[in-house]
């Protein structure tokens, strides 16, 4: 069993804590909460500064669930003892910082897994198989992904929602095969910094892609639809963690995405799977590059 600490104490951190407590491979050790007035509802050692955590002996691994500008600072501490990391998306607030982070991880042989929510699903491997066997038949892909919120000042909603959708396609297809990437805002609410955006591009100059994403959805939605020639379709409902072919359920995940991520993290630590680490960091950087071309973080 690995010791694991958390950096960040927002609502998402509480969900992470609950999942860690369910997971048989990790034991919760510390939490870094830089908000002095924030109360933690779990029996866990609380620290106020990131450097306090890395001054402790025998830190096992760290889950970073703070703002993206923290990630580069953390990996500079982690490289000293090669401490494995999970980083929440986006891994940085700029493409250049993403490249620096990836370089540090590679040169120091650190296992670093960016939490790409849609990638860390048991459905994802089935989705990959479907695309492999049906690639020549694929006509178009549509993704609807968003919710009502979060609403953050000065941060465009595509950094909260567009990252998930685009990184999913970057992981499924080669980024180098994307072309004619365009972005259009189709709904806006300045009072709450709300927005729904549409991305359009092509893959291999033959598959048309549309992504509708943002924080003004009436209810949470994570749906990827693949349309084949001949009116056949595959739907990945990423909220229910299920796959449907021609409206018939063909696969259902047994684990939550977070618990599956922790399982893969455990294997990556044991096997020192640096190839997966570098692949996902590279894909995270490429996703950041696409978003940064339209909106700086």
Image (spheres, helix red, strand yellow):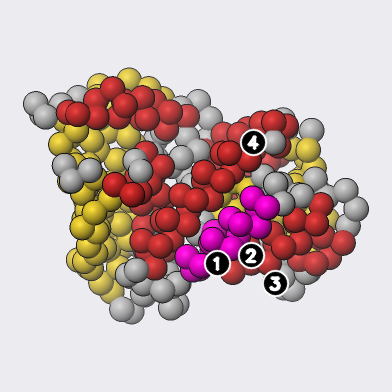
Mark 4 Cα-neighbour bin, 10 Å: few <14, some 14–19, many ≥20: some
How far apart are the two marked residues, 3 and 4, measured between alpha carbons? 34 Å
List x then y, in percent, for residue 167: 40, 49
List x then y, in percent, for residue 98: 53, 61
Secondary structure of the magenta portion, mostly? helix
How far apart are the two marked residues, 1 and 2, measured between alpha carbons? 7 Å
- Among numbered discs 1 and 2, the one appearing first in the sequence: 2
Residue drawn at point x = 63 percent, y = 40 percent: 274
- Is residue 11 visible from the viewing direction of this image? no
- Among numbered discs 2 and 4, the one appearing first in the sequence: 2
How far apart are the two marked residues, 3 and 2, measured between alpha carbons? 20 Å
Q: Which residue is mark 4?
A: 273
Q: Which residue is mark 2?
A: 72
Q: Which residue is mark 1?
A: 97
Which element carries disc 4, helix, strand or loop?
Answer: loop
Mark 2 and mark 1 in contact (Cβ < 8 Å)? yes
Mark 1 and mark 3 in contact (Cβ < 8 Å)? no
Residue drawn at point x = 72 percent, y = 63 percent: 76
- Magenta range is 91-107
Mark 3 Cα-neighbour bin, 10 Å: few <14, some 14–19, many ≥20: few
Q: Which residue is mark 3?
A: 35
């Amino acid at each position: 069993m690995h010791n694991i600490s958390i950096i960040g104490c927002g609502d998402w951190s509480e969900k992470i804590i609950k999942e860690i407590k369910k997971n048989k491979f990790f034991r919760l050790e510390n939490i870094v909460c830089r908000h002095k007035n924030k109360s933690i509802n779990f029996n866990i050692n609380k620290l106020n500064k990131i450097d306090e955590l890395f001054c402790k002996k025998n830190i096992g691994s760290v889950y970073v669930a703070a703002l993206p500008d923290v990630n580069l600072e953390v990996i500079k501490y982690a490289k000293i003892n090669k401490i494995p990391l999970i980083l929440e998306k986006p891994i940085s607030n700029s493409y250049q910082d993403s490249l620096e982070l990836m370089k540090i991880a590679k040169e120091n042989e650190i296992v670093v897994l960016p939490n790409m929510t849609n990638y860390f699903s048991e459905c994802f491997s089935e989705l990959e198989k479907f695309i492999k066997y049906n690639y020549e038949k694929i006509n178009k892909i549509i993704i609807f992904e968003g919710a009502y919120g979060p609403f953050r000042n000065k941060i465009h909603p595509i950094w909260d929602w567009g990252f998930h959708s685009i990184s999913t396609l970057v992981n499924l297809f080669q980024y180098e095969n994307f072309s004619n990437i365009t972005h259009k805002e189709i709904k806006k609410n300045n009072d709450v910094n709300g927005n729904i955006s549409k991305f359009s591009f092509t893959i291999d100059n033959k598959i048309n892609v549309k992504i509708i994403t943002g924080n003004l959805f009436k209810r949470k939605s994570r749906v990827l639809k693949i349309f084949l020639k001949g009116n056949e379709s595959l739907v990945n409902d990423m909220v229910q963690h299920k796959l449907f072919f021609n409206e018939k359920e063909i696969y259902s995940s047994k684990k939550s995405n977070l618990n599956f991520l922790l399982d893969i993290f455990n294997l990556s630590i044991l096997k020192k799977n640096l190839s997966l680490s570098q692949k996902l960091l590279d894909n995270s950087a490429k996703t950041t590059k696409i978003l940064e071309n339209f909106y700086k973080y």
